[in-house]
Image (tube, rainbow, N blue to C red):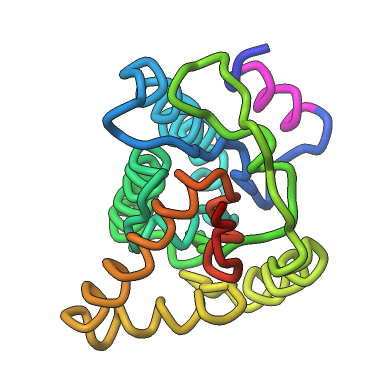
Amino acid sequence: MSHEEKTKTAVQYFGHIDILINNGGRSQRSLCLETSIDVYEALMELNFLGTVSITKQVLPHMTQRGTGSIVTVSSTVGLIGAPLATGYSASKHAIQGFFNSLRIELTDYPKIVISTVCPGPVQSQIVHNAFTEELNKPVTSAGNQEHKMSTGRCVHLMLVGIANGVKEMWIAQQPFLLLHYVWQYAPTFAWFITGMLGRKRVQHFKAGLDADCAYFTKPKTS
C-alpha cells in the first residue's frame, strides 16, 4: 500500500491522526570513495523522501483539525557529520532542514508540534541492516553494542520530550551528548575534536572493527 492509502485507512479506522512518528530508515557503513551512487540514492529515497512523503499525507489532516504532533527520528549525524556515513548523514541533514523549515511554515498552527529526535548510538538492528558500498552487500560484523544507550532508555526520553512538546531532542550517552554541546557553543573547537575522532573511526573501520565501538576499543595489531 502507498502512504496515501495507509493514511486513509488510519483516518477511517481511528477518525483522525493525533501523532505521526517517522522512524523508518537505514544507516551506512562505507567509505565515500568505495560507495556506489546507487547507495546514496537509496539512502535519500528511504530516509528523506519516504519521510517527506508520509508527512505530506498526514499533515493536511492535522492542519484541518488545527492540532497534532509530527515526531521524526533524525540522528546525531543529522547535526554533526561523520565518516563512513556520508550518505546517511546527508539524508539526516536533509531531514533537519526540512522539518526546521516546515515548523516555521506552520506558525499559523501553534497546536501542531514539529519535533525532531537526534539520538546517538542506540542498541538496535540499525547496524546489522546498514548499507555498505554496494546495495546488496551486507555488513560484515555489527560489533558489540554494550556501550550504546539501551533502546528502552532512548524511547523513555523520547516520550518525555514528546509529552512536553520539545522541538529538538538530543538523546545520547557521553561522549556523544557532549559533542552536541561543543558543536552548538564552540564550533571551531568541535571541528578539531570531530576530525580527531573521525580519523580514529576510519582507522578502526579499516582494521575490521565496528565503527561505533571504535571510540571505545583499540584496534588489534598483529
Q: Which residue sits at x=42%, y=41%?
A: 88
Kindly indicate the quadrant of the structure image that contains residue 141.
top right
In the displayed structure, does residue 71 sit left or right of residue 185?
right
Residue 28 or 151: which is nearer the viewer?
A: 28
Q: Which residue sits at x=32%, y=43%?
A: 90
Up/down of 29 relative to 176, above or below = above
From the top left corner, tell me how far across and down residue 51 is, in percent.
Answer: 50, 36
Task: Tell me, yes or no, whether the highlighted magenta stretch contains residue 7.
Answer: yes
Up/down of 220 relative to 42, above or below = below
Up/down of 46 relative to 190, above or below = above
Q: Which residue sits at x=40%, y=77%?
A: 180
Q: Quadrant of the N terminus?
A: top right
From the top left corner, tell me how far across and down residue 44 is, in percent.
Answer: 39, 29
Q: Main secondary structure of the magenta part?
A: helix
Q: Is residue 106 visible?
A: no
Residue 14 or 23: which is nearer the viewer?
A: 23
Task: Tell me, yes or no, whether the highlighted magenta stretch contains residue 22.
Answer: no
In the displayed structure, does residue 175 sit left or right of residue 35?
right
The furthest residue to the bottom: 185
From the top left corner, tell me how far across and down residue 139 is, in percent.
Answer: 62, 31
Total number of numbered discs in the rendering: 0
Q: Which residue sits at x=47%, y=70%?
A: 167
Q: Is residue 104 visible?
A: yes
From the top left corner, tell me how far across and down residue 112 is, in percent.
Answer: 51, 59
Residue range of the region highlighted in magenta in the rendering: 5-12
Kindly indicate the quadrant of the structure image that contains residue 37.
top left
The furthest residue to the front: 222
